[in-house]
Image (spheres, rainbow, N blue to C red):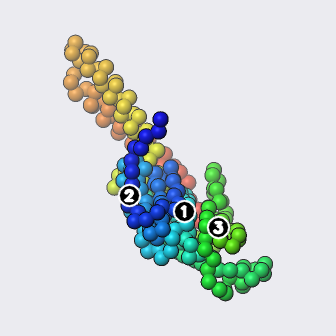
Amino acid sequence: KPYAKAEFNHHKDGVTCLACSAPLMLLATGGTDTQVCIYDLKSLKLEHSLARMQHVISSLDFLEKRCFLAVADLGGFVSLWRTRPHPDRWQQVYHFSNLPSMGDASLRLTLDRGPAVALHALKFEPQVGRESEQLRLFTADAKGGLRCWDLSRLCERRGIVEVNLAQLFKSKHGMASPRAAVSADVAAAAEEGAVGADAGEAEAGAMPPDAGDAAATFCTGMNEERAAQAMLSEPRQRPIVG
């Protein structure tokens, strides 16, 4: 039977949408209070709140390779925000409006009249296992319109490139990446069991009291050295060109 492990009550009104990111270990929620709440999935606590929107939040999506969070609202606006572990986390990168089209094939010339059309959903194009030359965002609006927005030129002009999440997590106050943190928890549990077994041998005089700690310290140092060498050998990320 399912049970409630945690409960969040940071929205002042109804919650309308949510999105999860496993690589970033973040949960984002939007509501009718025009607020976006961002939670840490490891601690199950509020990480940050975005309260600069003026309309009901309708959709959210993460793009982990650029530490992006896209937010759509019923006012017809899309805003792009940086997330952790990027140094510019929680800063707005850009925003634009979903203006109505006059039916011309060139949206650049026609998206300039009338109020913005309310947005109901958005989604980044998946970029699994490849370095994409295009960064595209799909939106769906209240008038049945589906649009594909190319953000490649925006990223090129602002120098927004794909990032190394493991390196950013490590450089931020020595924080390990979420995947590394889980591996560390498993290793700690295994080590605890090994120390418990060694404790019985120590009673018979087979092992000095602090030998287990010294061995664990040595292994940890070796793992950190190997991780540093692997990180230095990784190729640098190249900017996405539109």
Side of 93 where 170 appears, left or right: left
* Residue receiving disc 3: 139
Task: From this view, report whether residue 54 is shown above or below residue 181.
Answer: below
Q: Quadrant of residue 4?
A: top left
Q: Residue furthest bottom?
A: 113
| Numbered disc total | 3
Of badges 2 and 1, the one in the foreground is: 2
Circle 2 packing at 10 Å, graded few (<14), some (14-19), many (20+), is few
Image coordinates for residue 133, horizontal then vertical, percent: 67, 63
For the residues bearing labels 3 and 2, Cβ distance under 8 angstroms: no
Q: Amino acid at mark 2?
A: Asn
Looking at the image, tell me whether mark 3 or mark 2 is earlier in sequence order. 2
* The C terminus: image quadrant: bottom right
Q: Amino acid at mark 3?
A: Thr
* Residue receiving disc 1: 60
Circle 3 packing at 10 Å, graded few (<14), some (14-19), many (20+), is some
Image coordinates for residue 50, horizontal then vertical, percent: 43, 68
Task: From this view, report whether residue 8 is shown above or below residue 144.
Answer: above
* Residue receiving disc 2: 9
Q: Amino acid at mark 1?
A: Leu
- Residue 161 in sight in this render: no
